[in-house]
Image (tube, coloured by chain):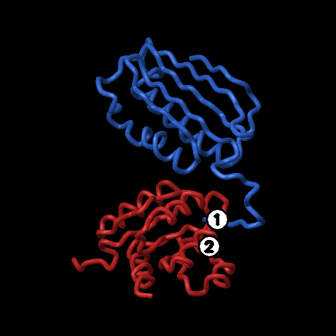
């Protein structure tokens, strides 16, 4: 099996749905990533971004229990940490506000997410 | 079986989902291995609503007694998913505080759940959408 571009990368997972968060984290660990989190809220994601000196990338669910994840996206951009959004719907606000960030639409298969994140890491 | 708590508590869509899943798992577990499946088993469920930092929380105390339990606190075989839901998923997704223990005479589970969801609906700021 080819080595994943995500291998040994420290990846923050922000996802409010427990089952998705756990599944995604397991899949990332399966390709050799080091998962930071998962965290379910803006507050906990901001703490993780502040307290983790080394983050290589992030996966960001857009709607966290009714709260939009924009502050997290802004903090990641400010730290130049590559990331992808993941959302259950097409989002004009995201396209306008973060045109450079890929939105990996749910439902996705893990290889799609892996590819999207690998591309984000390439810059 | 005794049920002891106020009626007319309004649950929003978030807290009703969390509580329904937890009660379903506890009930299933009690039917298979616990108080609802054994002749001498008893179940006492108490609940109350309390304010915590100005926000309403529901506290549910699920106490089984008179039950012949398996030896370890690992949970009977098959109860793993329900236990994981209560111990991991409810805190993660719904901001709940939970304990789940298999005591010598049956399961004792406590669930404290914010009735306004893990984050205040008031912070929606006009945004909406499914995630």
Image quarter hosting the N terminus of chain A:
bottom left
The reply to whether the C-beta atoms of the residues labelled 2 and 1 are less than 8 Å apart is yes
The residue pinned by badge 1 equals B130
* Quarter of the image where one finds residue B20: top right
Image coordinates for residue B108, horizontal then vertical, percent: 47, 25
Image x and y of residue B75, in percent? 35, 32
* Rendering quarter of residue B58: top right
Q: Secondary structure at mark 2?
A: loop
Q: Residue at x 40, y 70 (%)?
A: A54
Q: Same chain for marks 2 and 1?
A: no
- Whether A10 is drawn above or below A98: the answer is above
SS for tag 1?
loop
| Other residues around mark 1 within 10 Å, as few (<14) / some (14–19) / many (≥20) | few
Q: Chain of mark 1?
A: B
Image quadrant containing the C terminus of chain A: bottom left
Q: CA distance from mark 2 to mark 1?
A: 7 Å
The chain in blue: B
Q: Is residue B94 above or below residue B34?
A: below
In the image, is A73 to the left or to the right of A114? right
* Rendered residue at 47%/55% (across/down): A19
Q: Is residue A74 left or right of residue B71?
A: right
Residue B103: give x, y in percent of width and height.
Answer: 40, 21
Instruction: Return the residue at label 2.
Output: A89
Residue B46 locus on image (x, y percent): 61, 23
Instruction: Give the chain coloured red.
Output: A
């Amino acid at each position: 099996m080819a080595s994943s571009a995500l291998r040994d990368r420290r990846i923050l997972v922000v996802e409010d749905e427990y089952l998705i968060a756990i599944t995604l984290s397991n899949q990332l660990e399966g390709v050799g990533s080091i998962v930071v989190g998962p965290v379910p809220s803006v507050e906990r994601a901001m703490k993780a971004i502040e307290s983790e000196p080394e983050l290589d990338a992030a996966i960001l669910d857009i709607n966290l229990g009714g709260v939009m994840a924009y502050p997290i996206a802004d903090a990641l951009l400010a730290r130049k940490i590559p990331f992808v959004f993941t959302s259950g719907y097409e989002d004009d606000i995201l396209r306008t506000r973060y045109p450079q960030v890929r939105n990996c639409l749910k439902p996705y298969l893990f290889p799609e997410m892996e590819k999207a994140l690998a591309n984000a890491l390439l810059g | 079986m005794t049920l002891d708590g106020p009626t007319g508590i309004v649950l929003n869509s978030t807290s009703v989902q969390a509580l329904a899943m937890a009660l379903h798992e506890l009930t299933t577990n009690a039917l298979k291995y616990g108080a609802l499946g054994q002749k001498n088993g008893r179940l006492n469920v108490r609940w109350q609503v309390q304010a915590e930092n100005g926000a309403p929380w529901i506290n549910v105390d699920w106490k089984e007694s008179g039950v012949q339990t398996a030896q370890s606190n690992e949970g009977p075989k098959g109860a793993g998913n329900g236990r994981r839901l209560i111990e991991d998923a409810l805190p993660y997704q719904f901001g709940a505080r939970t304990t789940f223990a298999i005591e010598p005479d049956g399961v004792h589970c406590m669930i404290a759940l914010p009735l306004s969801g893990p984050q205040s609906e008031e912070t929606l700021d006009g945004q909406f959408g499914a995630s």
